[in-house]
Structures are given as C-alpha cells and as structure tokens.
Amino acid sequence: MHSFRIVSFYVLATSLQIGAGSASAQSVNIETAVLCTSQSQPNPIDTQYPTQITGTINGTYAGLSIPYASARAIVPSQYAILRHAYESLLPGWPKDMYPAYYEGLLDHDIGIGPLKIGDFQRSSIRFPFIDRLGDGHTSFRYTGPVMLSPNNLVALVGASVGNDIRAGTFRPACEAYADDGHGNTFLEGTGVGSSKADVRGTFRVTSSNPYALDVFKNMTNQPSFSSVGTLCDHYISLYNSSVTQGVNSPVPVQGSVYVRPPYYLKETTLAASGYRMDLSFIETNNVRCESLKGYSGTGPGDSG
Ligand SMILES: *[C@@H]1O[C@H](CO)[C@@H](O)[C@H](O)[C@H]1NC(C)=O
Ligand SMILES: *[C@@H]1O[C@H](CO)[C@@H](O)[C@H](O)[C@H]1NC(C)=O
Ligand SMILES: *[C@@H]1O[C@H](CO)[C@@H](O)[C@H](O)[C@H]1NC(C)=O
C-alpha cells in the first residue's frame, strides 16, 4: 500500500543513519526492533529480489459488501468505480453494493536484501477497482486512512511525508492475530488518544467463502494510491511463495469488522468473509500512476 511503502523507505533511510548517531533514528530502530518478535515465518524471497523491498504480510483479508453509495462517498469523486471489473470477478454481485476489503496485518521481515527494518502492524479498508487513470480499464486500489504501529514512528512518518497514516496500538501486539478464547481470531487497533478500539476484525474458520482466493489475488495486486500525494505504490502480493503454500495455505474465514471514523464513514460493524493468510510482497513505491496503465499483474503468482 502507498502509505506503507513510504514508511518502508523512510525507515530504511532512517536506519541507515544510525551509525551517524541520530537520536531519533535510534529511537525508531529500538522501538521497531525490540517490540516485535512474532511467530511469522521469515521472508522467503529476500535473496531472490535483493535490490527491491520485500517482506511478508501475515493477517486477515476480508471482503466487505458495502453500499455502492458509501464507496462513492469515500473514494475521491474524480475517480470512477470500475463496476464492470468487479462484476466480471464476482458474478451475481448486487448492483447497489460494492466490494471493499479489510486488512489487518503484520508486516514482517521487511527490507532490501539483508537490510531489514522492524515489524509493524496495520489495519485499513481498501477500495479496489478504482479508475485512477480515467482509462475506463486499469484497476487501482484506493487506500483509506491506515492505522499503523508503532506510535512514534507513525508520528515521525506522518509529519515527514504527509500520508494518511494514523498512530495506533494493537492487541495482540506484534502478531497478525490471536485467539480470543471463543473460537475466533482477532486483531484490534486503538488509535492514539482514542478511549476505545477503532478497528477490530474478528474471524472464525468457515468452509464456504463467497470470495474465491483469486478475487483477493486480484484485489491485493492492484497498484494503490491514497488521498495524499499523486504517486502510486506498485505493490506485488505473491501467492506462490512458501508462506502461502502447503501447511501455510490460506484458510477461509468469516466474521465481522468493527470500524469507526476515520477508518470508515460511520461507526459500524460489517459482515466480512475472506482469508487468514500470509503473503510475500515486492514493493516499488512512488511510481507514476500513469506508468501502470493497463497493468494486470506480472504472472500467475500475482494475478487472477
Ligand atoms: C501468521 O501469524 C499467525 C499468528 O501469529 C501465526 O500463527 C502463523 O504461523 C503465521 N503464518 C505464517 C505463514 O508465518
Ligand atoms: C511466483 O510468481 C511470480 C509472479 O507471477 C513469478 O515471477 C515467480 O517466478 C513465481 N515464483 C515461483 C517460485 O513460482
Ligand atoms: C483484476 O481483474 C480485472 C477484471 O477482470 C482485470 O482487468 C485485471 O487485469 C486483474 N488484475 C490483476 C492484478 O489480476
């Protein structure tokens, strides 16, 4: 996602300054490095793509059927919604609804080759199938405000790059999700200054899922953009690496997402269905959106 790529670059740049003795750089590094030791598997592709930002994104991805009018109210009005694109992937999709999706994730083992930054968590709602270029064809994902940990890093990044990143703390800390003791997994984010949770996903394993995995493969591989800035994030989510296969295969889940402003229009609990899964990613940030005209993925590992 756009915000996250900027974070990646920023933190990588910041980490590089540590030898020069920058106090703020040290505090960033200490917080990100010490707070998170997760159970997630290591990044399996860092040596394969040594000159690019790679990592893993472990968590829950869940489709949210929201009123079309709500999506229209959130996505900047100059960009059309490519209804025909999602109707082709979701046959029988109701006319008055739109497929947004939630993601509650742990970004893990991120870096460029051997240069790694600390893990962090994030939650946001994404709005795929947006006509960012006005070409009537290429699908982009619009990303709403993103809650991101850790707090001081968020504050630093927010101030330095002006993205719509909000500081928050998560339960469980440093993991993609945890068992709630009632047969569900959850991830709950509370914004700095909030008296209660702002985003919470609660899911249990299901045998039926209204969204084929390929729908997520498609949505999570659309280049992303946000309300801030004019550049795009060319983010490739791979479904063919070891963290997504065999014993790590995606698990269908259903449940709900509780959310309130600024993460959604109003306070509400939305029914949600999707997958608990871990993906590897390759990220190229700050790309001219126009350069992605006609983009449809790079191959079978990331397009569907
Ligand atoms: C994803 O995170 C969960 C929760 O911490 C963990 O149990 C699981 O092993 C992780 N998956 C992978 C492939 O690392
Ligand atoms: C995974 O998919 C990507 C994109 O399609 C491809 O470039 C890569 O070679 C694939 N990796 C494996 C191990 O099949
Ligand atoms: C997503 O699906 C749309 C509609 O079928 C297609 O045009 C686009 O190329 C797909 N994108 C990816 C990344 O798979």
Image (cartoon, helix red, strand yellow):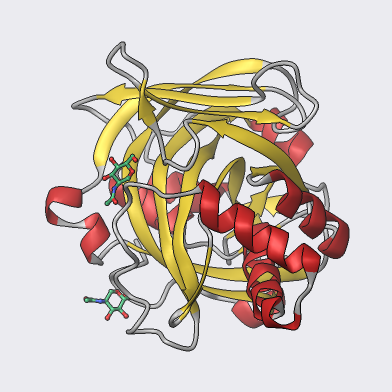
Please provide percent x and percent y for residue 155. Answer: 80, 50
Which residue is rendered at x = 30% and y = 22% of the image? Answer: 204
Please provide percent x and percent y for residue 47. Answer: 34, 83
Q: Is residue 94 visible?
A: yes
Which residue is rendered at x = 35% and y = 57% of the image? Answer: 279
Quarter of the image with the N terminus is: bottom right
The one nearer the camera, 182 or 15, is 15
The one nearer the camera, 212 or 255, is 255
Please provide percent x and percent y for residue 29. Answer: 63, 63
Instruction: Report which quarter residue 203 is drawn in.
Output: top left
State the residue lying farthest toward the bottom.
51
The one nearer the camera, 205 or 297, is 205
Q: Is residue 255 above or below residue 144?
A: above
Q: Is residue 74 above or below residue 220?
A: above
Which residue is rendered at x = 55% and y = 75% of the image? Answer: 294
65 relative to 43 in the view: left or right: right
290 relative to 244 in the view: left or right: right
Instruction: Report which quarter residue 280 is drawn in.
Output: bottom left
36 relative to 303 in the view: left or right: right
